Amino acid sequence: MKEYQTITEISGPLVFVETDEPVGYDDIVEIELSDGETRRGQVLESASDYVAIQVFEGTEGIDRNASVRFLGETMKMPVTEDLLGRVMDGTGQPIDGGPEIVPDERRDIVGEAINPFSREYPEEFIQTGVSAIDGMNTLVRGQKLPIFSASGLPHNDLALQIARQATVPEEDEASDDDEGSEFAVIFGAMGITAEEANEFMDDFERTGALERSVVFMNLADDPAVERTITPRLALTTAEYLAFEKDYHVLVILTDMTNYCEALREIGAAREEVPGRRGYPGYMYTDLAQLYERAGRIEGREGSVTQLPILTMPGDDDTHPIPDLTGYITEGQIYIDRDLNSQGIQPPINVLPSLSRLMDDGIGEGLTRADHADVKDQIFAAYAEGEDLRDLVNIVGREALSELDNKYLDFADRFEEEFVDQGFDTARDIDETLELGWDLLSMLPKDALNRIDEDLIEEHYREDETAEAVEAEA
Amino acid sequence: MSQATESDVREDGIIESVSGPVVTARDLDARMNDVVYVGSEGLMGEVIEIEGNITTIQVYEETSGVSPGEPVEGTGAPLSVDLGPGMLDAIYDGVQRPLDVLEEKMGSAFLDRGVDAPGIDLEKTWEFNPEVAEGDAVEPGDIVGSVPETPSIDHKVMVPPDYEGGEVVAIESGNFNVEETVAELDNGEEIQMRQEWPVRSQRPAKEKETPTEPLISGQRVLDGLFPIAKGGTAAIPGPFGSGKTVTQHQLAKWADADIVVYVGCGERGNEMTEVIEDFPELEDPTTGNALMDRTCLIANTSNMPVAARESCVYTGITIAEYFRDMGYDVALMADSTSRWAEAMREISSRLEEMPGEEGYPAYLSARLSEFYERAGYFNNINDTEGSVSVIGAVSPPGGDFSEPVTQNTLRIVKTFWALDADLAERRHFPSINWNESYSLYRDQLDPWFVENVRDDWPETRQWAIDTLDEEAELQEIVQLVGKDALPEDQQLTLEIARYLREAWLQQNAFHDVDTFCEPEKTYRIMDAIQTYNDAAFEALDAGVPVEEITDIDAAPRLNRIGVQEDYNEYIDELEADIQEQLRELY
């Protein structure tokens, strides 16, 4: 292994080194400072006489006398089942004081794309116990469903609630060869505050979830460049546990916005031609290489489900980060500021939220035969009610027809009863759907045009309930 | 994929630098757009710039660990696809490597590097039936025989367009593999079932004609309001979650093309898996055979290498043109062209080219036009007629249609299906906005609809458009004063328009019956609503209050026509009931 003391330029997170032997692209580098400290980095560009290196731990204190070693391999993550229950920093070094990790395998963190031909289409319903998700935007195993949030909103509480409550109902019935498929949570934190980190850790410890979790922590005061590898370490671990050890892995990545900021920082330091809002032009590809590492593989038991969290700058979902994310992921869950200020927990706005894999994950044998129709009808009725709210502000309730008033009541009760359930309540899918019928029965039967007639007969609360409900309202 | 068929030996080069998918090599003797093999692992790449003795290459595979000093080997041939029997039913990556074969070769569910495989099976034998006899003269493009490739499609074996042609001296029927010679010409040219074609050049045709036949999609809003012609071009722009992919899938499933080429360009892996799992189980509504028998899939998902994403639309359209040459109507779906444009942008920025609008290269517009111009209704060089229809999804950032890819696409395509996030939010699917969308083919296709569906198709459609337009205007007033403040006739119009939206424009892609709607049914639903409209206005004129008219039991049944299999009977009865119930009111 050749050592160089030929640093020519240090700029932001980048170090340029003259070399006389070829160095592989993406290879790992160790830089030893004059005081003996070692930092790690990665080759970003390799030419025959120089290389550009991004240093994970920051370039502070590096001078031109530092020595640079090229390890001749790309970044690897040591993986083993023993990682469960461990807490690591953003570069994968244990920080929980536990024993050293003895890896089964060392895996390239970039990961290879899953051959679309080898994938299995995800259609196994995950019950999160959250009505706004289960009923309206169902999550399935192998899906990537981001939470679109913004600063000051309780996205972390929602993520924790899902991590705590997620189950697959009637597992033994659904597939009898499912034994040994356990549930695991991988938590990748990028640039979150120490306080937020504590919140997560406390919850993990309180609920005993830590035993089945692997935690990667890059905190707000850790080097930004390190954030670019944290999610890759997390996903490499997830893939190993899912596809080698048959775990059903839920990966929570928070906050993707910080990850993208780090990408922009590196792009700027390299003087690349910037894309929208200064983010690098390859951000779509880069994000896709993370998000697409969710899924199922034919013939393997396990699955990787991703729940990335991102905070939208200025609550703007046309910002490049949520925008590119939305084009890659299979839907999104919106956290809404208005609902939050009304005290609704979790404040999920179901209208712009979407789960693309929902239609194949629900219905008879999966959830319930009436699920799809109920969902469609609630969406339509709630959207109608939302529209009318604007109108009420102008003309007042009295000017509206009886039916319109019912839609308004429906929208209110939907938010207060269906969406609002508290962060500690878990509802199973039956409860959620029955609640849906309670609400839909406020509307006259012939307004339920999205629901099959037989299902209306079966589930519609006949007059007494409907009237009682009306009287109440 | 196929390269290295030309025998001239070229000099190898040496890697000078590596930066992501862009690699430069020194002393490589290669032409522009030649395919080269990069590094000791032999990663496939393409020459995209030559400057002095430095050649710039875009690499179709991940370049981690590749280092300067490794060799680069030229093939002397441009990026080409293998054309021949075996392409239908296949699923390829962006450079025509069959993904199922790759899985087998790599022995893993993950895509490894440096593995190559021919686009069509070279071992498999096919039954060849000659269509010309010894002594016949054939010209380039002429059909010499056919192969029953799938139950739906006879694969025609043609004289490659770059041959000279001549008299057939030997031809026989029998089972051959794709590399064996099936016919010989007097000038020594040998014809195999397999031919190659460089993806970036258009296959020649005699003449481009004006399309006059619609590509029936089975989607009411498309066939009814915004039809596309066989050989036409269409763009589907929309923000994420508005239903681009579902619309593309619906078209791939139900469009009445002979062949469908589906290019998943930089999209989600799970979506491609859905196609792979669903299509073999679905029936082609026109032939009753498996849908997969007429489909060729190209899947370059978003996490597969970016350079292969750039090339996948060319791979797709070249395959489409090849089937067009056999006289088939081909429909190509590209989902999404924005990813393709972004791949161009990414490569361009790595080359440090001067950027145009929003960082896209200045040649964006030219590349898009070149691509869409390969669509059309053609008189082929062998005098058959065939068409390539191109339907491109566009994913504008933030749903903003003023961005460069949408704008440059709209300048070229003649059909515009604008997807609308508001409609999607209220689960109005397909969420195609009827006020913003347009089709410039409408007039030239009208004669077909008149002849094949109903005489008054254009008039009835115009009535529907007018009603929807009027609704849009009235809605603005309703937003201010409420519905009840409107005069009765306008309230009735709103009600009729609501049925047009709910019973006619909305269509459930996930319902077994509603997912496909033949033109006759499209017409009848529209007509049933018009029947209600006419009878209702008559009743209104006779002094019946509007609430009573809209309150009749029969009217909501309009919303259920879509899911009826025996719709004719259902509509006849419904129309009678509507008229009877309205008559009873006065």
Image (cartoon, rainbow, N blue to C red):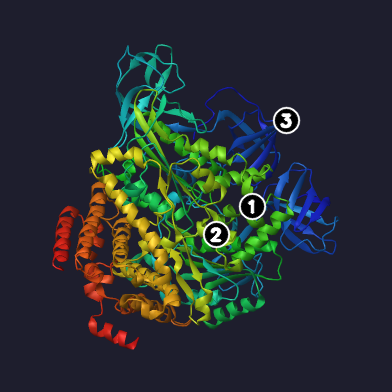
Q: Give the spatial CA distance, label 2 vs label 3.
A: 41 Å
Instruction: Place residue A466 in its image quadrant.
Output: bottom left
The amino acid type, in three-letter code, at marker 2 is Asp
Q: Secondary structure at mark 1?
A: loop
Residue A323 is marked as: 2
Measured Cα–Cα span from mark 1 to mark 3? 29 Å
Look at the numbered discs 2 and 3 and tell me whether their residues touch, using CB distance below 8 Å.
no
Instruction: Please tell me the numbered disc located at residue A275.
Output: 1
The relative height of residue A391 versus residue B1 in the rendered view (above or below) is below
Q: Position of residue A273 (x, y in %)?
A: 69, 49
Give the position of the C terminus of chain A as an image quadrant. bottom left
The label number, if any, that marks residue A152 in the structure image: none
Asked whether residue B281 appears in the rendered view, the answer is: no
Front label number (2 vs 3)? 2
> Few, some or many C-alpha atoms within 10 Å of disc 1 (few <14, some 14-19, many ≥20)?
many
> Badge 1 sits on which subunit?
A
Q: State left or right for residue B50 relative to residue B394.
A: right
Q: Are marks 2 and 1 on the same chain?
A: yes
Say which of marks 1 and 3 sits in front: 1
- Image location of residue B134, percent across then percent down: 31, 13
Amino acid type, mark 1? Gly
Q: Secondary structure at mark 2?
A: helix
Both labels 2 and 3 in a single chain: no
Label 3 packing within 10 angstroms: few (<14), some (14-19), many (20+): few
Name the disc covering residue B52, or none.
Answer: 3
Residue B157, visible in the rendered structure: yes
Locate residue A418, reporting x and y percent.
Answer: 40, 78
Q: Residue at x 52, y 37 (%)?
A: B369
